Amino acid sequence: MGAERKKRKIRRMNEKKFVFDWDTQEDTSQDINPLYAKRHANQMLGRGHLAGIDLKEQKKQRAMFYEGLLNERRTAVEVDRANELIDLEKAKDRKVAWDDRHWSDKPLTEMKERDWRIFKEDFSISTKGGNIPNPLRSWAEAPLPTKLREVIASIGYKEPTPIQRQAIPIGLQNRDIIGIAETGSGKTASFVIPMLVFIADLPKLTEENQNQGPYALILAPTRELAQQIEQETAKFATGMGFKCVSIVGGHAVEEQAFNLRDGAEIIIATPGRLKDFLEQRILVLGQCTYVVMDEADRMIDMGFETDVNFILDALPVSNVKPDTDEAEDPDALRAALNQSEKFRQTVMFSATMPSAVERLAKRYLRRPAVVTIGTAGQVVDTIEQRIEFISDENRKKSRLLEILEGSKYEPPIIVFVNQKKGCDVLSKALEKLGFKATTLHGGKSQEQREAALAALKTGTKDILVATDVAGRGIDVKNVSLVLNYDMAKNIEDYTHRIGRTGRAGKTGVAITFLGKGDEDVMYDLKQMLMKSPISVVPPELARHEAAQGKGATFKNKRKEKP
């Protein structure tokens, strides 16, 4: 009673001693430490429980006692009613469990709004715009003509990619689309398949109407991408009885004009050469009603904005969609025009959406549906990105040889450099050491470019040394390694470079040599590595001053053509 209570000493903030007195309530480790989360109870005597008493058995006996008491007092009617309520509860639980099945266990007719939301989350699909149709779950459920479905099966397309799942149903509604998807995501098929359905409903090309030009036009920024799209489109179009022709620079105008003598339903072109054809009246676009702009951001970067505007302004205006809610309603669009005619459909695909691309979309697209797969400008999750800090040129060469001489990476392999001269020098050095290397850059003629790509695809050459010309759209199958011998000058080019590997769901590796002159992209590179689930930010990059924040970027006034 009269004993003095010991006061706890209050520690002053200026004392430098560490006090070990703490209260158990101050412990913050209970959530993560298994010793605290699962406390070990005392076990002794009898049946392994405290004092031989089984708490579970006691609860069970108590429940049986009360149940017996209730059974004695209840009438037969009350017992039947209780059993009926239990059965109803069980039936309700079964129904909830049945409705909560995963979308993959349900037929299409039983899919609810919640299932479609989960489906889109599973494939990282996000959409903007009114009246967006539900995505495709499989090719078998796609509302496509039987002949086209057979062509898809013969090509070997087993499951649609995320961009195909959402873009194809929208395209089939005659809607304008802006597709923002990663490189290597199967974009080509996502606009070619609706295009073929669109053309199949139009009158066949005859001697009377073939001089009015193609029904569909695909614009691509580079010759290589245009020819890549032509090869992919031909797989579908030939089986449907349609003809596709490419118009690109590097080939004789007379030869390409000769290919158009019998007309073509589909034309794939680069903006510069197509503008020449239109100005010389070799080609007209009098009946062109389906337009695709692939890699729109790259076309703008390469200075083709004026050419693209010229081409799109040359299209007929009689079938331009109204800029009203009707443009989002497929039934209203069909009612507005005769069944034999169709409104112009404009599709734009881009990895990023800079302001110039948005300006282009605002001018030529009517109430477009925006489909985004993943995050705009992001690299696919199947690419492992590795960074190595090497400033010395000799060390870079020796490290490159170490990687190539190891048996870890199977050909084909793509090595990126920033300048044409460095491209040729590095390729010759590799050939002297016994490697089968070839080059691809802006100084090569079209025939040389095609020969280099063909050699890599057929296995005649194992290594392609290239500038950013090959960074966009070139689809070489099974590239196991992309090596950035010189780091790209901006993160967009880096994204497209490493997008040559890890395509169509396969895994790939991208190794980048970073040096003193790459400070401008270090912050963006660090952010990209942090977003990748299979890549690690090296300590040198994480600690580097230039990687701590996005500073002002310095650009050389003199820029060599890649």
Image: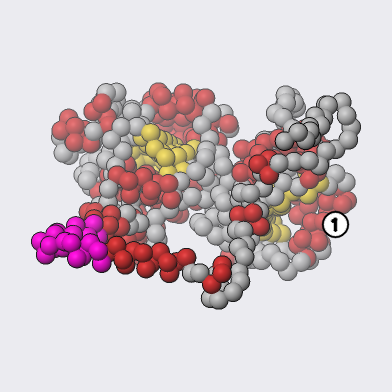
Residue furthest left in the image: 77
167 sits left or right of 515 in the view: left
Quadrant containing the C terminus in the rendered view: top right
Which one is nearer the viewer's eye here, 535 or 222? 535
From the top left corner, tell me how far across and down residue 251 is, in percent: 53, 45
Whether residue 127 is situated above or below residue 85 in the rendered picture: above
Q: Residue at x 43, y 46 (%)?
A: 121
Residue 90 drawn in magenta: yes
The image quarter in which residue 159 lies? bottom left
Residue nearest the observer in this picture, 346 or 224: 346
Bin the neighbour count of mark 1 within 10 Å (Cα to Cα): few under 14, some 14-19, many 20 and up: few
Measured from the top left, where is residue 293 in percent x and y?
44, 37
The three-letter amino acid code for the residue at tag 1 is Ser
Image-quadrant location for residue 523: top right
**Furthest residue in direction front, as rendered:** 2
The residue drawn where x is 27% and y is 32% is 328
What residue appears at the point 51 percent right and 31 percent down from the top-left corner? 353
**Where, quadrant-wise, is the N terminus in this rendering?**
top right
The span shown in magenta is 68-91
Q: Is the magenta stretch mostly helix, strand or loop?
A: helix
Front-lying residue, 475 or 536: 536
Residue holding disc 1: 398
Q: Where is residue 231 in the image (x, y as percent from the top left)?
A: 45, 54
- The answer, for residue 541, to whether it is visible in the render is yes
Determine the residue positioned at 46% across, 46% down: 124
- Secondary element type, mark 1: helix
Residue 311 falls within the magenta-colored stretch: no
Looking at the rendered structure, the number of numbered marks drawn on it comes to 1
How far from the left and from the top, in percent, is residue 273? 49, 36
